[in-house]
Amino acid sequence: FMMFLFGLNRFADAKRAYAEKESELVYDLALKLQEEIKAASLVEDGYSRNFSIPPKLENFDYEISIDSEFLTITSGTALYTVRIPNGTGSINKGPNYIRKEGGAVYFNQ
């Protein structure tokens, strides 16, 4: 019985560490994208840049959404929302294009 409890405790520790790693990766991606968008909003018109977002965060699936002035990254156990400058378009996994024109920021347009 003691071995069972020890094994159960080790499993719970591993599961917690797995969830913490996933949460950290989601948080890091949200902050990186926030900085990318912020930088585009602060530079002169004519700015453009290609960047890529990985299809998975290590082996974790996730989703990206933009709603008004918020970018949200969600995964199985984590959700992070960050405020971003207002922009038009969507950000996707894989290649992305960001530009500033007429004082506005555009994603993949």
Image (cartoon, rainbow, N blue to C red):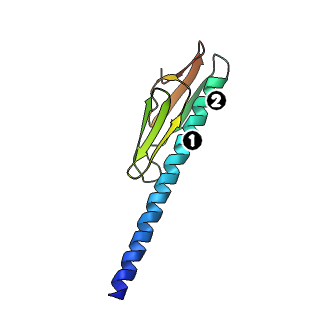
Q: Work out whether 1 lies above or below 44.
A: below
Q: Is residue 99 left or right of residue 70?
A: right
Who's the residue at 44% across and 70% down the image? 13
Quadrant position of residue 45: top right
**Image point 47% across, 20% down: which residue?**
109
Amino acid type shown at disc 1: Leu
Mark 2 lies on residue? 39
In the image, residue 6 sits, relative to residue 34, either above or below, namely: below
Dot 2 falls on a residue whose secondary structure is: helix
Image spot of residue 27 (x, y percent) = 52, 47
How far across and down, in percent of the image, does residue 23 sit?
48, 53
Q: Is residue 6 left or right of residue 106?
A: left
Residue 92 in the image, given as x and y percentages of width and height: 44, 33
Q: Is residue 50 left or right of residue 74?
A: right
Q: Which residue is mark 1?
A: 31
Q: What's the amino acid at mark 2?
A: Ala
